[in-house]
Every structure is written in structure tokens, then in C-alpha cells.
Amino acid sequence: MPGRPNKPPDIEPPPPSLVPIPETPEKKALRRLVPSQVALLLDSWKGAPSPDLMGPFDKAETAFGSGDYAAALTSLDLLSVRFAEPRWPSLPEPFRPLRVPIPTPVPPHWDPDHALPVAEKDAKKARKVAEDQLALARGCVAWAAGHGVDTADLAPRLESAARRLGDPAGLAPFYEEIDSFWTGLRGRLPALKVGKVPAPASSAEAEEA
């Protein structure tokens, strides 16, 4: 038929679904520990985060260094809860995935992924986690550029990781690059200082004062 008036609209293909791969506790902890350290080095903490934040981080760092990755993950879980508390400055993008997620309750049928097969849900979740890792790594490079931390030799790994992310079977090679980046950055970050001031008052307390 001329002009094909009944042709359905073009639909963009979804991004490749990445096959989830098993993760060791060591790698899980590494991928959270290093960006959490950078998050605590952000200028919003004025060079000395509260002990309420540094306590969980120090425990995670100590546990990771001693090979107790389960304990490191437990401390990082507590830190993610602390990051989400309203008494602190809100973490900027791309560091917000370090906060514990607080989803808004919605009926299951409102979730566009509700009817997807479990395998497809897992693949979408794996891709989102990988995208967050790449964004965190790039955010760390941006922070490093303004704070005298040389990452010139590490940055190319992120470009390689980004290319791997577009491969349907690319999660394992993707994380090889990302994990090498985190390992290299970890030894270059400056030590954190613990603040001696009390935790910031909540907005309600500040208004009363």
C-alpha cells in the first residue's frame, strides 16, 4: 500500500541483557569500599566526616584488609544506611547508589518489570548494577582530577569497561576492568580524617534553634 499508513511505529531495541555472573564477597566489598571512601572525601564533609560515618567505614576497611569480607560487607551495609539518613548532606550523583535504597511502595502491577520472567529481571538488575559501577568510577576520576590524585593510567580501563558493557556476554570482562580500576585507585586515596564535631542537626532542629 503506498506510504504504508498502517506500518507500526519503530521501536528501539532494548539494550543488551547482560548475563549475571557469580560474585565473590571480596569483589562485592571492593566495589563498595573504594567509592565509599571517595564519597567521604567529598568537599561536602569539609575534610572531616562525622564519627557516625567514619566508624562503619573504618570497620569495613579493617575487615577488608584482614580478609574478612563478610564483616566488611556488614559494615558497608551500615554505612549505606547512614548515608541515607536525612541529617547528612545528600550524596550527589553519581554517589547516590551507595545509599541504602528506600523504594516507594507501589502496587506490583504498577511495576513495568512485574510480568517479566525471573531471568530477564535478574539480567536487567545486573545491567543496572554494572552501569552504577561505571558511573561511580567515572565520578571518582572526576573527583581525583580536582584533588591531586593521578588516575591517568586508570582512566582507560573505564573506557574499555564501557565498551564491554555493550556486549551481551560482557559482564565478566567488564568487571575485570572495573575491579582493576578500584584496586589501583584504592592505594592512591588520601587518608580520611575523623571529624570531632557532633553530627549535623536535622532541618527541624535547625529551624527550632
Image (tube, rainbow, N blue to C red):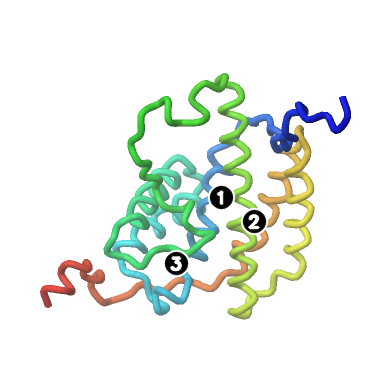
Distance from disc 1 to disc 3, alpha carbons, whole Å, reads 16 Å
The residue labelled by disc 1 is 30
Decide which of 154, 111 is in the foreground and name it.
Answer: 111
How far apart in space, not on screen, are marks 2 and 1 (Cα)?
8 Å
Q: Quadrant of the C terminus?
A: bottom left
Q: Where residue 31 appears, x then y in whole percent?
A: 57, 50
Instruction: Indicate the amino acid at tag 2.
Output: Thr
Amino acid type assigned to the residue bearing label 3 in the image: Leu
Labels in figure, total? 3
Q: Residues at badges 2 and 1 in contact (C-beta under 8 Å)?
A: yes
Instruction: Please rate how many residues cluster around mark 3, counting C-alpha atoms within 10 Å: few if below 14, some from 14 to 19, many from 20.
Output: many
In this figure, which residue is indicated by the disc labeled 2? 183
Q: Secondary structure at mark 2?
A: helix
Which of the two labelled residues, at mark 2 and mark 1, occupies the earlier sequence position? 1
Image quarter (top left, top right, bottom left or bottom right) of the N terminus: top right
Q: Residues within 10 Å of mark 1 (few under 14, many from 20)?
A: many
Residue at 68% across, 51% down = 178
Residue type of the residue flagged with mark 1: Leu
